[in-house]
Image: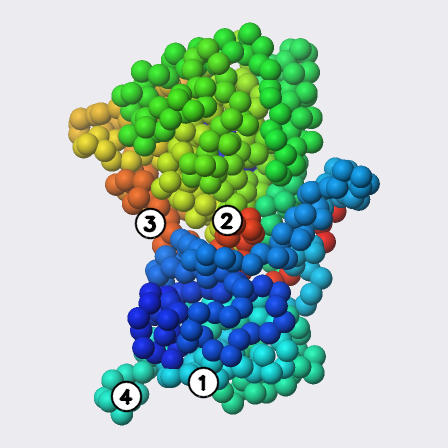
Amino acid sequence: MMKFASRLSSLYHGRSSGLARSWPSLSSRFVVAASSASSVPMSLSSSPPWNCSIIYGDSSTSTRLRFLSSQPDYTNYETWHKSNYEQPSNSHSLPSIHGHPHQQTSRDLHADLPRTSVLMELSDRVGALHDVLKYYWKYDVNITRIESRPVVYNRDSTAGGQSRPKFDFFVDFHGKVGDPNVNALLKELKGMTDKLLVLDEKEVHWFPRHISELDLIANRTLDAGIDLEADHPGFHDQAYRQRRSKLAESAQKHRVHDEIPTTEYTADETETWGIVWDTMESLWQKYACKEYLSSMNLMKKHCGYSRDTIPQLSTISSFLKLQTDVRLRPVAGLISSRDFLNGLAFRTFFCTQYIRHPSKPLYTPEPDVCHELLGHVPMFADRDFADFSQEIGLASLGASDEDILKLARCYWHSVEFGLCREGGKNKAYGAGLLSSFGELEYSCKERTEIEIHEQVGKIDGDGMPLCPEIKPWDPAVAAMQDFPITTYQPVYFLAESLQDAKLKMRRYCEMLPRPFFALYNAQTETVHIDRPVRRSMGVPEASPAG
């Protein structure tokens, strides 16, 4: 239950418009992630003549986008992947920033070619987008992405007496202001658009752009698996510390797309797991949300969950990848809240493998394999929960320190200690509750109005609150709510459902002053952003800025 506190401390078819036609309606958002072909086609009135993936969603759900293109071209990424991951049997190992034979950064994807982003505002008329895009072709400027967003309708009326809509187009292309062809293009666009803005490059906190870059932050631990505090139950147990050291070393060697090695747990470790399982099992039936119980049944069936066996991360990760596109990534110890949340943007959960000390099987001062696999992992088999977690992760990319703190608090009060309403009762979906026998009952126990009135805000002789305050789930409120890390929570947030929690979190993330809009392309395992930025702050060691 102490997990995140420690991490914290450190377009539809059929519209007859010239802007849409057989393409998705521009009244919805769409994104075109183009290939490296050197020119953009003449018209959007028929199927796109260049290879691209189209990603779209309604304007109110900007981060829940899906793929439409049946034959997207990811040549750049495939070439990069083959050159960095698929080594010919007779080749020498590539140089590596990690000392790992097949791993390099994604610099080739993003940093080698200069890129410019512009915002074009166009009135909806037949042929409008065609008239603009032909100049990219004329001046041999390669578009890498184009996205539309509807603008509030203007008040001018057309001849038919109806208002004419406008659309903003965010366009990324290779080249920079000052290049002769880019200057000529911008000069032409000024006369063709209602508004044209060149978006300046913004300096932001470093964030991963490709899933491979998670390797750069996974080992930025605030402490490693063997760095125990003096009050840790295993502090004086040298055999326990050596075991932690071995597991930490294995995690530090792991790289994205590597098979997670099997961990041979000892009899003592399995016994500790069994004690926790036996203590929690009846409480789950009583207090866990239905999504957790359903997912736990799946984990038993497909991942070997039982009281007598600690399941393997590799088996679980493979199952979750098929179920909800979530993967587990071994980590040696606690990492910062920024790095941890950045991983969620890629639907990747940083997961410890060590287990609590056997002298106190029902207590752990840090996240361990019991907390991870019994608290967090089953919930990741639920699509709404996985999406919810990714919402927080995407919002964390490039965010300010202030907003990271807000998002971390939201994470704490939901993913770690969240409650939801079910059948007229409060149920737990937070991992800190689902892996803590005492706090699970404390948080979900039914109390009379008199008991609540008399006990809220009061503590017992051990410094524990007698009764929690339950607040409706509101991310804006949760983002400002501090929390203790050594006692039960005095405040919990109650969502109407996981769907309710997700939608409210999405709306909150959209309201944050984010430096850019980000979406995750699951097919290329890459984050696309809507403006050029320089990732210059907090750059990981051996990673180029940019």
- Gap between marks 2 and 3, in whole Å? 21 Å
Q: How many marks?
A: 4
Which mark is drawn over residue 194? Answer: 1
Q: Earlier in the sequence, mark 4 or mark 2?
A: 4
Nearer to us: label 4 or label 2: 2
Cβ atoms at labels 1 and 3 below 8 Å apart: no
Q: Residue at x 38, y 52 (%)?
A: 506
Q: Tag 2's secondary structure?
A: loop
Can you give x and y, in whole percent of width and height, for residue 345 in the image?
51, 47
Q: Which residue is mark 3?
A: 503
Task: Indicate the amino acid at tag 1.
Answer: Asp
Q: Earlier in the sequence, mark 2 or mark 3?
A: 3
How many other residues sit within 10 Å of disc 2, few (<14), some (14-19) or many (≥20)? some
Q: Earlier in the sequence, mark 1 or mark 3?
A: 1
Q: Residue at x 43, y 48 (%)?
A: 391
Task: Report if residue 6 is visible in the image.
Answer: no
Task: Indicate the amino acid at tag 2.
Answer: Ala
Which quadrant holds the C terminus? bottom right
Taking the image as shown, residue 436 lies to the left or right of residue 205, namely left
Can you give x and y, in whole percent of width and height, for residue 31 in the image?
46, 64
Q: Is residue 270 above or below residue 466?
A: above
- Gap between marks 1 and 2, in whole Å? 35 Å
Residue 278, quarter of the rendered image: top left
Which quadrant holds the N terminus? top left
Task: Indicate the amino acid at tag 3.
Answer: Leu
Q: Which residue is mark 4?
A: 157
Q: Tag 3's secondary structure?
A: helix
Task: Report if residue 16 is visible in the image.
Answer: yes
